[in-house]
Image: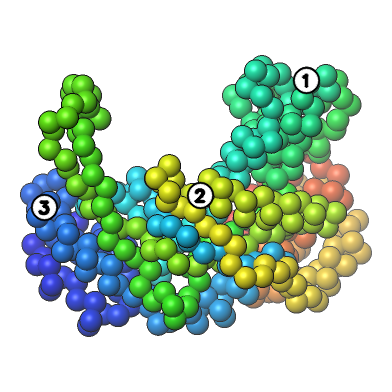
Amino acid sequence: MMKGFEIGTSLRNADCPGLHLGLAMGSLAPVGGTDGKIPDDARGKWLAQLSEVSVNDDYKAWFDSRWRKTIGRAIQGKVEAKSRLLVGAGDPSAVDVGLRVHHTWGVPFIPGSALKGLLSHWLETSYGPSPDHDAEHPLNPQHPEPERAKYRRAHASHGAGEIQRILFGSPESDDDRKWFRTLGVSHGSAGTTACRGRIVIHDALFFPSEAIEKPFLADVLTVHHANYYQGKGRANDYESPNPVGFLSVRPGTEFLLAVELAPGENAGYEPWVDFAHKMLIEALADWGIGSKTAAGYGRLDKAGRHVRVEQPVDSIGEELEAWLEANVDELQRDVESTDGPTAFVAHIERVHGASIKAATGEIRKQRKQKILTFLANKLRLSGTKRAQIRTKFNESYPD
């Protein structure tokens, strides 16, 4: 944290119309003393200056030409903040309250992990079983609320219900193993009850528009009972209010929401993408997202049409898939050799390495997934060797 900067010289947005907000908050903040915090009497002016930071002119070109094209066959559309939005309040900050911004561009965004967490929690609360049945395993066919049990999230004692398992996956659980045996359900090729989710919810990035060129807003919350919240005594009526200034995202700011099927998943799961997208729109409007939702923050509504974007056909990927099927016997011999992982990856490198390395974004992920799916479903090998080959392959072709 850099000290000694004067407000007005450390941040001059008129001279830097595309200043990175994260850089300004982290490195240019006029902190005082040794606590890394901006003095109370300087915060208001500092936050007012930060609220004048505008989006970098190059962001729109990147958003249109790179970001939207890396998203696969997703349902895409805008959501608009109907109230102020505060995501990342717990992040480190020189004004005590943080704000999550994009690492590269400094624009507001909502992490995909936050959107998934919201949807999972909202589904369980809205459609899940009564708390009276918390002790019941969601896979138990004799569950008192069998349809609602499908929306049960994973907990310490058991994995997730059927719908949560499809959408978000589920961790390994010994209790699940017992019910899998009872129901005659396969554990999968690795013999585990854990599974990954079938859908991907992308980060909701700031949607550039002329209407909102300055998406940040100086905000304030007032603490009336500081001693009580710090555990120093009871709440009373004679403590002095303590205003705390911070930044939030202004109402009217739009974000691109995108939900798609996870790479390599069977197209039969596509209806779950539509389901997740519809439910997520409802959750954002109903509960909101981020901090201070009880005070009305974080509400977002659907803006305009949301459509499924068809990704161009990857003809090279189709050639790769056909080559794998045609050479299954030769690749089986590779994995059975003394150093199977090295032999398998070297064979891929000789024939298709260049096409995988040349691909970017979602196309690269899909080509890699074709090979990993082939490895899991078509080749006969132990779980240990399969894991070794996956590791070797991912090291050779990182995302």
Q: Amino acid at mark 2?
A: Gly
Looking at the rendered structure, the secondary structure element under dot 2 is loop
Mark 2 surroundings within 10 Å by alpha-carbon count, few (fewer than 14), some (14 through 19), many (20 or more)? many
Instruction: Compare residues 163 and 301 and report the one nearer the observer.
Output: 301
Relative placement, left or right, of 173 versus 246 is: right
The residue that label 2 is drawn on is 288
Marks 2 and 3 close (CB-CB < 8 Å): no
Pick whichever of labels 2 and 3 is earlier in the sequence.
Answer: 3
**Relative image position of residue 81 (x, y in whole percent):** 48, 61
Pick whichever of labels 3 and 1 is earlier in the sequence.
Answer: 3
Look at 59% across and 24% down and name the residue there.
Answer: 156
Determine if residue 141 is in view: yes
- Name the disc covering residue 144, or none: 1
**Relative image position of residue 195 (x, y in whole percent):** 71, 39
Relative placement, left or right, of 123 versus 6 is: right
- Name the disc covering residue 39, or none: 3
